Amino acid sequence: MRFLPLAHGSALLQRAMVDGIRLWEFSPIDVGILVGVAVGYLALGYVVFQYATRRARRLGVLGDY
């Protein structure tokens, strides 16, 4: 569940709000997982967007604006 896009960040935010934990008080592993998941999903989204753009151009359905 930690590697879903918003699950781990939401859990950390809940811990911060309920328990009053500050960002630097979280374990480096928790923050690393949070950053790693964010970078991973950003990279995956970029790759999918580039693929879709190339395919749309190849099919001629991408208009010029």
Image (cartoon, rainbow, N blue to C red):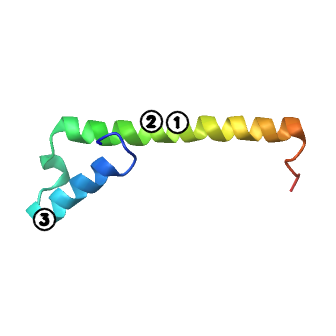
Q: Which mark is first along the chain, 3 or 2?
A: 3
Gap in Å between the C-alphas at discs 3 and 1? 32 Å
Check disc 2: other Cα within 10 Å, few if <14, some if 14-19, many if 20+.
some
Would you say 38 lies left or right of 25 here?
A: right
Gap in Å between the C-alphas at discs 2 and 3? 28 Å
Q: Position of residue 16 (x, y in %)?
A: 17, 59
Q: Quadrant of the C terminus?
A: bottom right
Q: Quadrant of the N terminus?
A: top left
Residue for point 68% across, 37% down: 50
Task: Tell me the element at label 3.
Answer: helix
Which residue is tagged 3? 18
Residue for point 41% across, 43% down: 38
Which residue is tagged 1? 43
Residue for point 20% across, 35% down: 29
Q: Nearer the viewer, residue 59 or 65?
A: 59
Amino acid, disc 2: Gly
Q: Are marks 1 and 2 in contact (CB under 8 Å)?
A: yes
Which residue is tagged 2? 40
